[in-house]
Amino acid sequence: MSDPAAWSIFLPMSTRDPLDKYREKRAAARTPEPFGGETQLGPGVFVIQKHAARRVHYDLRLEIEGVLKSWAVPKGIPSDPADKRLAVHVEDHPLEYAEFEGVIPEGEYGAGEVIVWDIGRWVPLEDPAEGMEAGKLLFELRGCKLRGVWALVKLKKSESGDEWLLIRERRGAPVREDEVYPEESILSGLTVEQLAALSEGFDPGEEIRRLLEKAGARKRRVAPRDVKLMLARPREEPFSDPGWQFELKLDGFRMLAARVAGDPLLLTRNGHDATARFPEIARSLRKLPYEHVVLDGEIVVQDEAGLPNFQRLQKRARLSRSLDIARAAVLQTATFYAFDLLGFEGYDVRPLSLAERKRILSLVPPPAGPIRYTEHFEEEGERLFAQVQQMGLEGIVAKKAEGRYRGGRSSDWLKIHAARHGHFVVVGFTLPKSGRMGFGALHLGVFVPDDAPPGRMVYAGRVGTGFDDRLLEDLRARLEPLRRDTTPVGPPHPLGAEHAWVEPELVARIRFKEWTDEGLLRQPVFEELEEMPPTECTREPLISSHDLLPELAPVITAPAVEELPLTNLEKPFWPTDGLTKGDLIGYYRTIAPLLLPFLADRPLVLTRYPDGIDGKHFFQKNAPHYAPDWIRTERLWSEGSERDIDYFVADSEAALVYLANLGTIPLHIWSSRLKSPDRPDWCVLDLDPKDAPFDDVMAIARALRELCGGIDLPSFVKTSGSTGLHVLIPLGAQLDHDQSRALGSLLATLVVRELPEIATTVRTPSKREGKVYVDCVQNGRGRLIVAPYSVRPLPGAPVSAPLRWKEVKPGLEMGRFTIRSMPRRVRALKEDPLGSVLELAPDLLGALERLQARLGNGG
């Protein structure tokens, strides 16, 4: 599916350019409005522009299919759910119109002033194509001002057909009926009245220059590339002092942000130009209504809890392709927090005191937007530090209120780190290298009490610093009696002979920076062993930044399943069987505890049937840009498609229900996980009967089990949910995909040699001569099988059912395993017949040697 518009290929094509109507109303030579061309805006953008035309109104524009679907809202965006506002559907606008801020000349269509009142990402909560056709769009807005869920509902009695209602929903972000939004542009900081006054001599910088003149600022233009940054000295303990200001130490990139002769400039600490990497910030710098300004500050990207996330910022900074950068600028927006003013037009502000610089700086950025003023706290450093520690932020910076801005490290600025501490179970160690004593690093585990199953211990990473030689030897001596052959933590975890595992009895106190997106510790340091029960080592929940940093607070958190906006639950999905979309969702919710372990950390491919099994369907690899943030997606290069694919990863019941609500029936998965995409968990042999008897399929499956048993390989079996069986051999991620395929090929060759009358490795159906095809081709990177417990889009709603080997005998019927019968079956079985395929790591080297010996001996 083409990126960025994941829905677009399912919409009817029009022979008419969607922007024809827009261009018919405007003349490019007479208006500064854009007419379609290059833009640094990615998919999923929304904009609200305040437009002082004949009447002042607001224009809501949502990106769909590469254009901005637009509604004029005369009375503005409602904050009160009881307040329904008229929204008139108007012509589509080009995507780059989202950046337009200016004056449309008198006599032209829409004459008047236009400002960008808000901009950000919009997330459809239902299929936008269906919504446009049905006359209802339900969506979340994640902007600089607006955060929450709204609905557009078409009025059925509208004579023109263009009248809709815009309604605030109570779900999502907290609703404040009396909420008042700043009226200034989030880019320039101007109101529409100030924009109009520019032509009459209004000077936005006049007040700032007056204050600088009064404060005695030096008249000299500051060149950004000549600035030497002022740096803080470290300090161990926080303090309080009325002569100091205290700021949050944000976990981001230090930057200089400047507007020079109308052009934006972002410079890193080392003087490198980063302007193109952060187009959302460059856009705002370009729109600032000042001739020349130089700001010192920090760029951050926040996580779902609203906290600065350095790992996500690093991912942003590594992007180089313009399309990837444009997409990330909408989906993972960066913000520049300005904490100092160095230059303004013809003035050098650095010789002024910090207190004076901050007072004047507060007038420069817009009240809300990609560039923001960094608030500070007077005197109360210790109180702020305590809050920062509780929130898990990086620390605080103390600045002398009367201090000047001087390049280099200065005792006028002090940084006080607020490292996090935690207790972790020691689950293993790495063998020492290069003359190191004792061990290389300790492997750590932690319990996740809210996960399923309860109390599961997961791998938390390794710690290799904080030890001296004596401690390395002492700890190794304590670890040796605890050695064991297998790891006590669930996958994923490191593999290989250099990793040793121990009984989970010792507990270590660890200092660390943060949790990474992969659930591992960042910058851990060993402090000491502590006497406490290992089961008390639990991963702490995230603490929201809303109380201390409301401007960084998240828009919406992952909902409970009961809060998901489910649609069309009564729609028939299996009409002849009386089963609906609601039945499908109910099944996946019921079976989630058994299904999710097979989906965890694994790329997922959907086949969607929005109108049930008798309607049209389509294959979907790429997650759409509007997928909720709480659903994990991972980008991988697809050799077949020759592009990056953003795969869904279903790691929660809510994610599974969300995908089912999209009309997803079968779920197809990789054999490998994202932590080790080239190391599969299983080798699969797909027994495809085509026209062969199912008894032959079972006979071949039993022969494979006997063959595997003879070489000490465990094997498992499940139905395909269609006509065949899948035999799976656990690999424990010990082989790569080529080796897995080679193993499958050897097994297929031997079983065909043993049962030549009923088995074949010939792929072409017409040449199989009525035999069962033993398929080993699905053992490749990115190759798919239907997930265990997945539903199939066939009459009767059959399911790919894990089996006990004793069930593979005459009388076995596929029709026994359906969405109606499987919940009863799993309750009766009490355990998953296939579960161990995810856990076992057999002796593959010995098995392969025995297998090759049998092949060489003719059987």
Image (cartoon, rainbow, N blue to C red):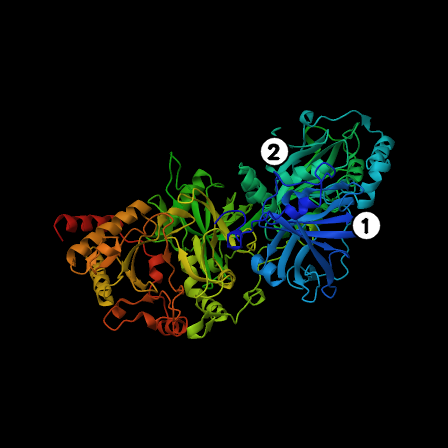
Q: Position of residue 829 (x, y in %)?
A: 35, 72
Q: Position of residue 756 (x, y in %)?
A: 16, 57
Q: Secondary structure at mark 1?
A: loop
Q: Nearer the viewer, mark 2 or mark 1?
A: 1
Residue 188 seen from this side: yes
* Alpha carbon distance from label 2 to label 1: 41 Å
Q: Nearer the viewer, residue 473 or 683?
A: 683
**Local crowd size for mark 1, using a 10 Å CA cut-off: few (<14), some (14–19), many (≥20):** few
Q: Secondary structure at mark 2?
A: loop
Q: Which mark is residue 450?
A: none
Reading the image, the residue beneath label 2 is 274
Mark 2 or mark 1, earlier in chain: 1
Q: Nearer the viewer, residue 453 or 640?
A: 640
Amino acid at circle 1: Arg
Residue 79 seen from this side: no
| Tag count | 2
Q: Nearer the viewer, residue 825 or 201?
A: 201
* Residue at 40 percent of width and 69 percent of height: 797
* Residue at 60 percent of width and 29 percent of height: 272
Amino acid at circle 2: Ala
Q: Which mark is residue 54?
A: 1
Is 235 situated left or right of 367 in this image? left
Do the residues bearing badges 2 and 1 touch, measured as CB atoms within 8 Å? Answer: no
Residue 718, quarter of the rendered image: bottom left
- In the displayed structure, 61 sits above or below 349; it is below
**Local crowd size for mark 2, using a 10 Å CA cut-off: few (<14), some (14–19), many (≥20):** some
- In the displayed structure, 257 sits above or below 150; it is above
